[in-house]
Amino acid sequence: MSYLLRKLVILVFTLWMAATLNFVLPRLVPGDPVSVMLAKYQGRLDPSAVDALKIAYGLNDLGSPVAQYFSYLGQLLRGDFGRSISLFPTPVADVIGQALPYTLGLVGITTILSFLLGSALGLYSGWRRGRPVADGLTPVALFLNSMPYFWFALLMLYIFAFKLRWFPLGGALDPFPGPNFSSGWWSSLLRHAVLPMFTILVTSVGGWLLTMRNNVVSVTSEDYLAFARAKGLTERRILSRYVLRNALLPSFTSFGMALGFVVGGSILTEIVFSYPGLGFYLYQAVVGLDYPLMQALFFIIALTVLAANFAVDLLNVLLDPRIREGRT
């Protein structure tokens, strides 16, 4: 219980630090949204409209930085992220609510699939090492893990969307997909998601494979496996009861981090495919100096990463008796 309480205190403190940095860092970027708009129109915008724009965006009377900070913390506690500047006057909560399902459906499902597939292949490669297929998986995983996923995304887009025209060039839905959740709507959603999902899956499965293989190789050298074989346990029981359970534990922490970053989306992949997820809107917010949207997305990413790690800590307590007994 003390272990989980200590983790909870660390989570709250880290979240406060993340919220504070989230307030400070965007304001270190030179310029403001109005100056960006003036530069965009290259002087064609009447300078007298600057004050009106600042009033519309709520930038005319922000108060001192300390007052802004406490106002920002109060808004976070109320769940009020303000209005987006780049998508004015849309509330930030509406922007996130619109983009979040796309990111969870695309990046979330793909992250889980890549973890399961990579861990299964890594378990086979480590347990059956010395065989041609098992050993051949390692260089393939190294190649996939080192390949830039944005480059692979551009390659897939060029071949299958531009040349062969099997899939759309971008977006998440056709202009007129039909009623929501109809067969035509689902068909359009899946066709737009195939290439981004395949890109993320292919470029991330290699890392999980290598991690799991290294864990299995490390576990198989332990003395308790030799003792288990001396007791006459079958290889299947040794694999499922001892090897798999102990090899998975180190991977859960990385998996928790990966799940937490799902909310941020695969930014470059979403940009390449113009997929309207949170990563795409985060890029738009940074380019447009959209402070409210930037702060909301960074805060949600930090919150989900910390929550996912806390969930992994809970799972480790259940799986690892050493933690329950206070020996770690």
Image (spheres, rainbow, N blue to C red):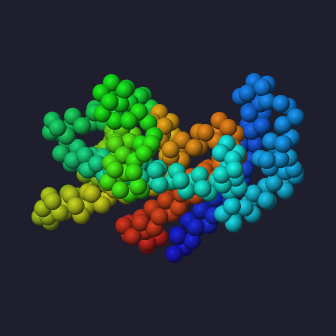
Q: Which residue lies at the image location 34% right of the left edge and 36% below the top edge?
A: 167
Q: To which quarter of the image does residue 68 belong?
A: bottom right
Q: Is residue 156 above or below residue 257?
A: above
The location of residue 293, given as percent across then percent down, is: 65, 49
Total marks in image: 0
- Is residue 3 visible in the rendered image? The answer is yes
What residue appears at the point 38 percent right and 42 percent down from the top-left corner? Answer: 192
The one of 108 and 305 positioned closer to us in this rendering? 108
The percent position of residue 308, horizontal first and vertical second, equals: 49, 59
Give the residue at x 45% y 40%.
Answer: 171
Near-viewer residue (191 or 141): 191
Left or right of 283? Residue 213 is left
**Residue 160 coordinates in the image, percent (x, y):** 32, 30
Q: Is residue 227 visible?
A: no
Q: Is residue 95 above or below residue 171?
A: below
Q: Residue furthest bottom?
A: 1
Residue 21 vs residue 190, the one in the foreground: 190
Q: Quadrant of residue 203?
A: top left
| Residue found at x 47% / y 55% | 101
Q: Position of residue 275 (x, y in %)?
A: 47, 41
In the image, residue 273 sits, relative to residue 314, either above or below, namely above
